[in-house]
Image: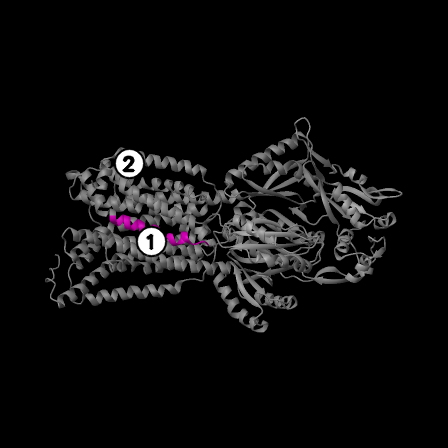
Amino acid sequence: MNPIQAVVSRPYTVAVGVILVVLFSVIAFDRIPVQLKPIVDLPRISVNTTYRGASAQEVEEQVTRELEEVLQNVEGLSEMTSTSAQGGSSILLEFDYGFDTRAGIVDVINKLNQVPSLPEEADEPIVAISSARDNEVINWVMVRSRYEVNRLRRLIEDEVESRIERVPGVSSLFVVGGSPREVKIQIDPELLIARGVTFDEVFDSIRGANLNVRGGTVETSGRQPIVRTVGRAIEAADLGDIIVKELAAGSVRLSDVATIFDGYREKSGFVHMNGIEAVGMGVRRQAGANVVDLIADIDEVIEEINRDFEVRNLDVELYAVYKETTYIEQAMGFVRQNLLFGAVLATLVLLFFLRSFRSVIIAAVTIPISLVSVFLVLSAADRTLNVISLAGLAFASGMVVDNAVVVLENIFRHLEQGKGRIRAAVDGGREVWGGVLASTLTTVAVFVPILLEADEASQLFTDIAIAISAAVAFSLVAALTVVPVLSTLLFRGGGNFVPRRKGLVERAYGRFCTGLEARRPGSAPAKIGFCALVAALSCASFKLAPAAEYLPTGNRNLVMFFSDPIPGTRPEAIAENLRPLEEWILSQPETERAFTVSGGFNGGGVILKGEYGDGDTLAEFHQRMFGPAMTTAGFRSIVPVRSSLFENPGKQFEVELSGPDLALLEETARDLEGRLRATPGVTSVRSSLVSGQPELRITVDEVRAKDLDLDVAEVGRIVEALVAGRRITEMVDGGREVDLNVVAPQSRVQSREDLAGLRFLTRANKVVSLGDVAGVRRTVGPQSIRRLERQRNALFTVNIAQDAPLEEVVDRVENDIFPGLLAELGPAYSLRVGGSADALRTTLGALSSGFGLSILIIYLLLVALFRSWLSPFVILATVPLALSGGLVGIRVAAELSPGDAAFDVISMLGFVILAGLVVNNAILIVHQRNNFEAQGVSRRKALADAARTRLRPILMSVTTTVVGMLPLAVGGGAGAELYQGLGAVIVGGLFFSTVFTLILVPVLLSLGEDVRETFARTRGRVDPLPAPAS
């Protein structure tokens, strides 16, 4: 039995199938995680090692190099970077997309076990899977209170932190502002000397007393209890009773040589919210968590905590200052609105063409069926619901009716011939099913190369590829099942069907097609001339291609700024220096909230009011902020940056300078930074290589130290305790670990002489000064040392203007700066661009190869469909026209909306999608011509009739697709910058290619017939040409 006939004869089966698919899709929709953008994560593993008290150069020499030596052999490693800073080393291992980080972390740990040795004072390296999501804060919660910030922080750590961390979906939470609790053991060096106690004896006694020691097991009455020697100090007051040393005169307790303070760590940073010192929390989510539901759950917990505080009469209130759901809801609401608007417009287009409510109902019902079914596929593929996948649905809203329109229009045509409704449905569906199958396969096939790629942009493309492919595939099923069944139920056939009148366009096109039925003298040169003209116009349009961008920045109402203080500036001074900028920000009408951070991370951010969240206002505020930022004293630079949606911001790239000699690297870095700042389009430059950090450098005389029964490590421990304070261990209080730190009465040494005069007792009971065993000199060094692939490296973060194309600026840097600088440095040094610039090139290469592979796949599918190696070339001739139209579309959109419709890699995806869409019109013409020829119609008449009969479904399908996408291509709003350029490319390409395809394809086919007949006539194998149709 004919498949279409089998479907038509089983309407209940079709209805049940549709209901089940929709039902399961709705269930899947409820389970799909909701977030702003797709999960894009480069596999990374971090190795962090703490080495307290060591300078950046000491950390590099004694820790980083040792670890790099073994980590370079980790399997699958693509790039290794490291940062050595005061107090610790951080190494980041990057792998290709798709790498199994769980297996990789085992390999990393095994390699670390091969490290010969690290300094005794260095902690064991901490290995962790590092994710870009680790830095994505979905919720900022601040504390409103009149209490002192240290007290607030302790309250948050004790009573709030654990309650929020228990919310399902929360990955981690970190507290900012104030200082954590610590117990300071303030050692008096002179008392140590007087009591005959060394520093190491103090360290060991505290560490030994603060342990739980396993004692084994004892058999008692058949039971085997564990024996544990309890030595862990529970209260800070107990620490003074620790016995440091037993002497003949009695025990020396810790309280005899030290004073114990239970307080707070010295402030290493400050957080201000709206100009007032504050405490807050940043909440990170687990991978796969539904952001919208998670933040709603967190809000409920915060309300409960606030009620508890109110009952206890505590002057504390938690409130959210930033939620990622705000932008998510705005962006997704805008997409949903455009999706609905596009679907309504597509339905109105159907009504305009079909002039029948019943016909519109038949075609329009396939829209929700096809779109809802996509959720089933997204859930099965373990994807998320985000702006990109929703945009794919919105784009598909106009495309999913294409197949239904083709089938429905052909059923219409058979009804006009006087057939009964069942026969018309069966014949109409059977006649075009091959064409719509081929069209669907080509639309879906173009996404196959994208799904095989694994870079950042391709991961973004995956969601839109799945959404469009699934929607179009389900629309094929609906067109070949639901449409024929509904046609038999809603249409009247036979003599009751009144044929419609042809419109002006159809009559004019019909006359053009009639002219193709006969070969007239001189027609071939005219056809060749037309084809040449189209080719010339297509080639000329490629000059319209604008310079390429990477990814859009986004229109989140958040502007960040990064400050680079003068090396050596203390956190409290940094906070004070930021005050004028902070006051300027708070005085602006757009500002809702502003925060600054000093110490560690230096910078801040501005949250704009909701009504100022559009792209133009953001750009204007961002530009205006440069003035006060650049004139703020006490900083090398302050750089305002619009908050980016992606890890690699579109208006930012990196330049990396690598070489062996640190001094030459610093000198060249200063020169390069100046050249980069002078490059047109560049707004700011930040360098990772910052010198001038004041430091007191101690060089131990190993021979002299050995004579005094000292070693370098012991001297280092003593100096750390006396100068910066030394963390010995931690105690547990209320389930939370509290650091125990040994410090001197004055933890900061003001001069080199003070440091050199510090006295202590050696193991041989000799009193020595630090100056007796070590040289002390004041010097400056780098704040941090970055290394790339085991070579010292300076990283420059270059921000560019919003109207400066990334590709153009990068070309200027590579062509105008790199050659001269590399010639001066020699072969041991290298320069390269990274970040967004490198990602742009990688993605362009992937898109180019993917586009070529898509064309090959389409060609092979067409060969299989038409059983010809040559016919597909006629169909593929429409692709250049689509590319030309896409370029025109993006150019026009960029002029009308320069902030949103950029020629970025998401927009470039439109050209790949177009390759699968525009061939559909040509497929319908060629497929219908073959059908007519199979029915015995002559080749030329079959061509003319095919073009004539396919005009209406082509115009209907293209118009519904274009109109359905139009709201996305021209509308503005939250998230629109992600897909507006893509919409402009597809709309422009479809419109431009359709206008020419309707003429070009018949002309090419007719020209092919001319050539075939000419060769056949020369061989005497062709009948006389038929007379032209009247």
Choose top left, top right, bottom left or bottom right for residue 1015: bottom left
User: Does residue 701 show up?
Assistant: no
Q: Which residues are magenta?
A: 434-454
Which residue type carries mark 2? Val
Q: Which residue is mark 1?
A: 916
Q: Is 450 part of what is drawn in magenta?
A: yes
Q: Is 145 part of what is drawn in magenta?
A: no
Q: Main secondary structure of the magenta part?
A: helix
Give the quadrant of the N terminus.
top left
Q: Which residue is mark 2?
A: 14
Callout 2: SS: helix
Of mark 1 and mark 2, the one earlier in the sequence is 2
Label 1 crowd bin: few (<14), some (14–19), many (20+), radius 10 Å: many
Q: Residue furthest right?
A: 249
Callout 1: SS: helix
**Quick check: 912 above or below 3?**
below
Give the quadrant of the C terminus.
bottom left
Q: Is residue 99 left or right of residue 282?
A: left
Residue positioned 25% across, 45% down in the render: 407
Which residue type carries mark 1? Gly
Q: How is the image coloured?
A: one colour
